Image (cartoon, helix red, strand yellow):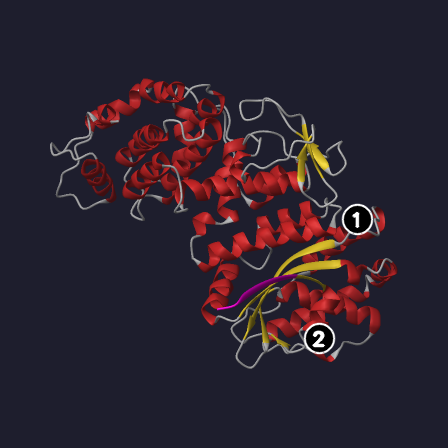
Amino acid sequence: MMVKVYTHTYNEIFKQYRNILIPEYQRPYRWTTEKIDELLSDLEEFFILRPNPNLEYYMGGIVFYQDTERRFQIIDGQQRLTTLTLIQYILTGELSESQNLAYNNHISFYNIKKNLTYLEGKKSLLEKLNHFNFYIRLRFTLIISDNEDNAFAFFDSQNNRGVTLGADDFLKAYHLREIYSEDLQERLAQEWERAVFQSQKEKKSESGLQHLFYKILYRARMWRGQSQLIPEDKDILLQTFQKQTHKSSIKDGYELFPGRVNQRYKSISLNADNTYILHANNNVNESSLDLPFAIRQPIFKGHNFFRFTQKYHGIHEYLFSENIAENSVIEARKYYHSIYTENMSVYLRNFMQLCMVMYYDTFGIVKIEEAVKYFDYYIGSIRIEKYYVKKEAVKNSLIDNSNNLLDVIANAYMPQEVFDFIQSQRNLQTIYENEDLDSQDYGVRNAYKQRVLSYFKQNEGTLKDRLQWI
């Protein structure tokens, strides 16, 4: 199996890959005029209102399946490539042979005709963009696979995400545009796409960047206090990780914040070869897991955002997926996979992952075997109490207890503070003392109970003493 990752401009794609086609199973071309307006507004801001001739505009990832006839089937990217081709046709009145894509759906025909008419009305803006040579500065990450199964896996995952780009695509494009080094842009884009490709290839959605932003980072940063906790959606995610990020005052670098993960350094910057250095010229040799960031710290635009993402994606993988780890992490992972099976509510699985990532961020591997069991004691009370666990259950548990567990984890100085808080929640113990699930009950609550009893090798059939088992 071959998987190759490149970066190309729009023009280079059609010059280097001449036999491009849209496979029959692809969805139709569906971009609306509203979507075109979003793109044109963004292009206008980048090329006309804030011109910088040394910067390229990052357009996201394109996925091709190279079949046995050496044709390049578009798996992801049809919507963007088609729209850009329409714009080129408005400007030049012609297309190259390699751009003569064949569409086999009446919905595509209708939207192409409608959008051509709409773009004719935008010709003045398009000509201004053309003056800035915008086409040769549109940059894509191109992933080419020669494995049809992987191609269909990509097709399914992109369809499940809908016609529009996912939040992670927008975040990647937004922050790449804040990076002034083309080499660094290319490296970070390729690292990002490899992470996306790996999770899709292995069909492990919980190791992907969408999951990281929606279920871990957003909640860790924004679910604070005990007032109303706003659930994540695409718009608020983009607001959090785009609009609420900061412009660094350090050229090609960013400030660091003092705290338990960083008591020495004030800033980080780049050498000419795009290697990272600390303010006193001490080389940064730590792994991404050791980067001096905290999960709730302010984020700077550009490569700070990518390094921040890299750290927490690495932590998530280290805790739940990687083969190599400290013994205590391996034991904590065994516990997680024994109890948090596919039979467990996905909302509670996500909650456990969130707690563990935040705990590792604060304490590393110190007492991590105990931590996973304490968190399960807290989270398991939700499973025992509710036959149907709805997505609001996690938010409500943070609001209804004497303090927000996520705040406790983030603000604690010693693991015992977290453990003491969980033990002090009398309502949790009451739930376990009152559980009366019959061993003959084949529901999800009793299945969870049996997994816990089996792990702790308990035969009495009750969970009322489970706090003592930790």
Residue lying at 45% horizontally and 22% vertically, measured from the top left: 408
State yes or no: residue 9 in magenta.
Answer: no
Q: Which residue is mark 2?
A: 99
Q: Is residue 182 left or right of residue 230?
A: right
Q: Label 2, label 1: how many angstroms apart (C-alpha)?
A: 27 Å
Give yes or no for contact between labels 2 and 1 (Cβ–Cβ under 8 Å).
Answer: no
The secondary element bearing badge 2 is classed as: helix
Query: Relative to 360, does residue 202 appear above or below in the rendering?
Result: below
The secondary element bearing badge 1 is classed as: helix
Q: Which residue is mark 1?
A: 45
Given residues 460 and 372, the one toward you in this image is: 372
Q: Local crowd at mark 1 within 10 Å, few (<14), some, or many (≥20)?
A: few
Given residues 305 and 225, the one toward you in this image is: 305
Rendering coords of residue 291 (x, y %): 57, 34
Can you name the residue that lies furthest to the front here?
282
Query: Magenta part of the protein: which range?
Result: 1-6
Q: Quadrant of residue 385?
A: top left
Q: Is residue 233 left or right of residue 440?
A: right
Rendering coords of residue 109 (x, y %): 65, 74
Query: Relative to 406, does residue 238 appear above or below in the rendering?
Result: below
Residue 60 visible to the viewer: yes
Rendering coords of residue 454 (x, y %): 18, 39
Q: Nearer the viewer, mark 2 or mark 1?
A: 2
Residue 231 visible to the viewer: no
Which SS type dominates the magenta stretch?
strand
Residue lying at 58% horizontally and 60% vertically, measured from the top left: 163
Q: Local crowd at mark 2 within 10 Å, few (<14), some, or many (≥20)?
A: some
How many numbered marks are there?
A: 2
Which amino acid does the dot numbered 2 rest on?
A: Gln
Q: Quadrant of residue 75?
A: bottom right
Residue lying at 38% horizontally and 35% vertically, measured from the top left: 393
Which amino acid does the dot numbered 1 rest on?
A: Glu
